[in-house]
Image (cartoon, rainbow, N blue to C red):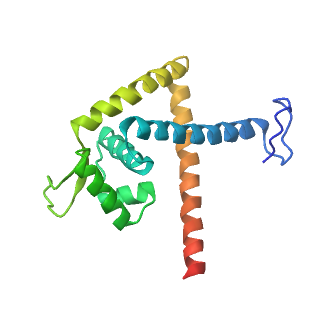
């Protein structure tokens, strides 16, 4: 990918892709780095290790979507082994940040839930960010935002597929 910052927006990049696509990919890369930075700031604010904070954000997000995570799904989401995830969850439980629940018809199924204390910390940290992002999106129509959301979901899916294939290829060559 070309990184010619001095090229006019209408000039095609050196690799033949569109300049708009190149700008979008650069913006997504910068977004990813900034997202990670915000995660580190949340960890520092909450007095947590970055990995613990990442797990909490995943648990909170899943709860917000109405689909609580299982320990196995959390392990997949944050890229830790089941054993490392179990150790992480033990730490978060001991600190009263997370509870494991078997409140389902299938008592074998364990789901993860954040505690009210964590909600307070997360809201204090993330609500101002949410307000800023909402303000940025306000000028765009619902249709524009929906189209962007679909495109980002497709980009994320392409990245997830690539990561899975790369992991499978690495595992195959090692094993």
Residue 24 is situated, as x and y percent measured from the top left of the image, at: 68, 37
For residue 122, which quarter of the picture?
Answer: top left
Q: Is residue 125 left or right of residue 101?
A: right
Residue drawn where x is 57% and y is 80% of the image: 174
169 w.r.t. 6: above or below: below
Name the quadrant containing residue 140: top right
All told, the count of numbered labels is 0
In this view, the residue in front, 107 or 6, is: 6
Q: Position of residue 17 (x, y in %)?
A: 79, 45
Work out whether 55 lies above or below 47.
below
The spot of residue 56 in percent (x, y) is 35, 45
| Of 78 and 150, the residue lying toward us | 78
The answer to whether residue 79 shows anywhere in this view is yes
Q: Residue at x 69, y 39 (%)?
A: 26
Residue 175 quadrant:
bottom right
Percent from the top left, x then y, of residue 163? 56, 60
Q: Tell me if 77 is positioned left or right of 168 in this view.
A: left
Identify the residue at the far bottom of this view. Answer: 175
- The residue positioned 39% from the left and 45% from the top of the image is 53
Vertical position of residue 5 compared to residue 127: above or below: below
Q: Residue at x 41, y 59 (%)?
A: 76
* Residue 72 appearing in the image: no
């Amino acid at each position: 990918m070309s990184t010619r910052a001095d090229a006019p927006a209408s000039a095609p990049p050196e690799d033949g892709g569109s300049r708009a696509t190149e700008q979008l990919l650069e913006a997504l890369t910068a977004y990813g780095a900034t997202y990670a930075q915000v995660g580190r700031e949340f960890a520092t604010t909450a007095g947590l290790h970055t990995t613990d904070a990442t797990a909490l954000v995943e648990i909170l997000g899943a709860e917000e979507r109405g689909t609580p995570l299982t320990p196995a799904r959390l392990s997949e989401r944050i890229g830790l082994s089941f054993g490392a995830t179990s150790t992480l969850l033990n730490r978060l439980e001991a600190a009263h940040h997370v509870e494991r629940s078997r409140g389902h018809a299938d008592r074998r199924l364990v789901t993860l839930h954040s505690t009210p204390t964590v909600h307070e910390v997360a809201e204090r940290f993330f609500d101002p960010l949410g307000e800023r992002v909402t303000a940025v999106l306000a000028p765009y129509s619902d249709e524009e935002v929906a189209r962007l959301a679909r495109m980002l979901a497709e980009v994320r899916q392409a990245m997830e597929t690539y990561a899975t294939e790369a992991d499978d290829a690495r595992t195959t060559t090692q094993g």
